[in-house]
Image (spheres, grey):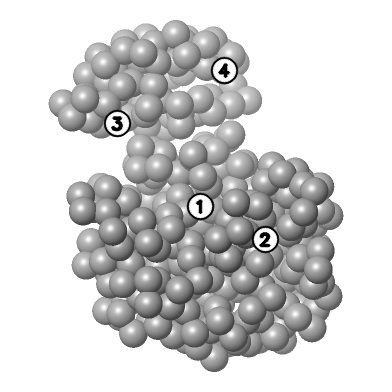
């Protein structure tokens, strides 16, 4: 991947934008584990980005890159304005959310309900591209909704965003049920239909297609990459973040969990100077030893020390499982 292609949707593996998960501390941690993975922010409404005087939604560490800002919204001008600010702040990609099934999002006329309005989404993409300073604009969506499913509408939606200049389409391989299911239930209840995403890639070979939804192992990632351009991991990457390291290029991957822990201690001590609490950082690290002996004790230790100032993060070095400390 050359520098012109260094954006999240061009990566083989990326971590999905997740509300209350993929904040800047989480992204810094994931980047330590996976130098070549694509990372995304939590979804932020375009109006919030445009009107935040302190630029709070655009803050990130340079080490997080390649990094994409995910925007919510359906007003082309507001999205264009937010895109310009994101480009100026150094983001490598701007992604439009057209897949969130939340009822609150739906009332605001964005998220998954936008699948019913491909022309509007295309207008938004075109407006964003005009202000992106050459950064790629991408879209994340689902295979349909409970009001509009089947391959035809999905293909029409994908063609519309492709013609508008979207560089990639990330597709969660479930429909979004817009009434009656919570966002959490929408991540599990609608059945996965990976074949729909494969078929979309076959129909639009020139569109970069990334598959998302229910993918939980390296073997599954490998199988999907034989059919589509990229794989986006969600809750699995959060619950078992070491999987990101296992999926990375062996020449660049993190050398070990203890290496990542020491780097995060150093990061936390620096963040402590700005008043961050330790728990705000370590909440994203609970799965570092998932599947390893002592993982439960590690999680309990993180909870016990969560209220400490981040500057006292050195205590974590003694909280790692004994076998991990001995192996380091």
State which tag comes first along the sequence, 1 or 3: 1
Which residue is denoted by mark 2 in the rendering?
A: 172
Structural distance between the alpha carbons of marks 3 and 4: 19 Å
For label 4, the crowd category at 10 Å Cα-Cα, with few meaning under 14, some 14 to 19 and many 20 or more, is some
Q: Residue placed at 18% from the left, 29% from the top?
A: 274
Which residue is denoted by mark 4 in the rendering?
A: 295
Structural distance between the alpha carbons of marks 4 and 2: 30 Å
Which residue is denoted by mark 1 in the rendering?
A: 17
- Kindly state the secondary structure of the residue where label 1 is placed: loop
Q: Which mark is residue 240?
A: none
Q: Residue placed at 37% from the left, 27% from the top?
A: 280
Q: Is residue 13 above or below residue 245?
A: below
In front here: 111 or 167?
111
In front here: 85 or 267?
85
Number of the front mark, 2 or 3: 2
Number of the front mark, 1 or 3: 1
State which tag comes first along the sequence, 4 or 2: 2
Structural distance between the alpha carbons of marks 1 and 4: 25 Å
Residue 204 is situated, as x and y percent measured from the top left of the image, at: 66, 86
Structural distance between the alpha carbons of marks 2 and 3: 32 Å
Residue placed farthest to the bottom in the image?
163
State which tag comes first along the sequence, 1 or 4: 1
Which quadrant does the N terminus fall into?
bottom left
In front here: 163 or 66?
163
Question: Residue 23: which quarter of the image?
Answer: top left
Number of the front mark, 1 or 4: 1
Left or right of residue 246: residue 61:
left
Q: Residue placed at 43% from the left, 55% from the top?
A: 44
Question: Residue 318: which quarter of the image?
Answer: top left
């Amino acid at each position: 991947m050359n520098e012109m292609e260094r954006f999240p949707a061009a990566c083989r593996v990326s971590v999905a934008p997740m509300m209350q998960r993929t904040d800047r501390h989480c992204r810094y941690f994931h980047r330590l584990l996976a130098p070549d993975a694509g990372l995304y922010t939590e979804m932020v409404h375009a109006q919030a980005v445009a009107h935040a005087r302190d630029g709070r939604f655009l803050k990130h560490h340079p080490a997080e890159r390649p990094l994409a800002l995910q925007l919510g919204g359906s007003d082309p001008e507001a999205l264009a304005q937010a895109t310009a600010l994101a480009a100026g702040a150094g983001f490598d990609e701007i992604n439009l959310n057209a897949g969130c099934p939340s009822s609150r999002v739906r009332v605001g006329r964005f998220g998954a309900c936008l699948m019913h309005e491909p022309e509007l989404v295309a207008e938004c993409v075109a407006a964003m591209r005009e202000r992106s300073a050459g950064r790629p604009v991408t879209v994340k969506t689902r295979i349909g909704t409970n009001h509009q499913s089947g391959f035809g509408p999905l293909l029409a939606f994908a063609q519309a965003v492709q013609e508008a200049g979207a560089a990639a389409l990330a597709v969660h391989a479930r429909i979004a049920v817009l009434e009656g299911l919570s966002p959490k239930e929408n991540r599990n209840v609608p059945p996965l239909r990976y074949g729909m995403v494969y078929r979309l890639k076959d129909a639009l070979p020139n569109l970069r297609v990334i598959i998302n939804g229910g993918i939980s192992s390296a073997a599954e990632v490998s199988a999907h990459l034989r059919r589509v351009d990229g794989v986006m991991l969600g809750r699995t990457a959060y619950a078992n973040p070491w999987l990101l390291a296992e999926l990375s290029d062996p020449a660049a991957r993190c050398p070990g969990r203890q290496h990542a822990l020491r780097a995060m201690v150093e990061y936390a001590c620096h963040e402590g100077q700005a008043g961050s609490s330790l728990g705000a950082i370590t909440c994203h690290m609970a799965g570092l030893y998932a599947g390893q002996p002592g993982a439960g004790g590690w999680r309990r230790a993180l909870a016990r020390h969560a209220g400490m100032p981040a500057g006292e993060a050195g205590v974590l070095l003694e909280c790692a499982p004994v076998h991990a400390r001995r192996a380091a």
